[in-house]
Image (tube, rainbow, N blue to C red):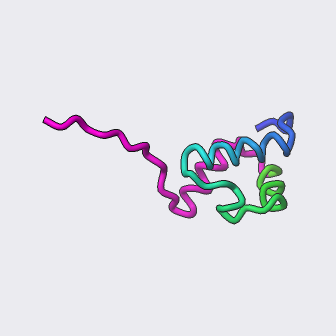
Amino acid sequence: MEKSVSVHNWMAEVDRKLRREWRVSAADAGLSKEDLKRHWTDGLSPIDFVEWFAEKYDLIRFEPYVPSERP
């Protein structure tokens, strides 16, 4: 990933993806701003970082409830 994405925007996108897919904020997941800055320097995109983090910590993806029609 190019470093053209600011650390602030990168952290915001990580937080949005965590909230959207796993219903947990970066802070709730135990990620401090310092942790996120360190991971930003690794060069992963926010999406790739969140996928890696979720796999590492075995997060369960949020699946919206869709009621089925009763016969």
| Left or right for 54, reference 41 | left
Which residue sits at x=80%, y=50%? 40
Query: Does the magenta-highlighted stretch encompass residue 55?
Result: yes
Quadrant for the N terminus, please.
top right
| Left or right for 16, reference 6 | left
* Residue most extreme to the left: 71
Residue 18 percent coordinates (x, y) = 62, 49
Residue 62 percent coordinates (x, y) = 48, 49
The stretch of residues the image draws in magenta is 42-71
Residue 20 percent coordinates (x, y) = 58, 43
| Prevailing secondary structure class for the magenta stretch in the rendered image | loop
State the image quarter where residue 69 is shown. Answer: top left
| Left or right for 62, reference 28 | left
Quadrant for the C terminus, please.
top left
Which residue sits at x=67%, y=43%? 16
Image height check: is 51 above or below 31? above
Which residue sits at x=65%, y=62%? 29
Query: Does the magenta-highlighted stretch encompass residue 11?
Result: no
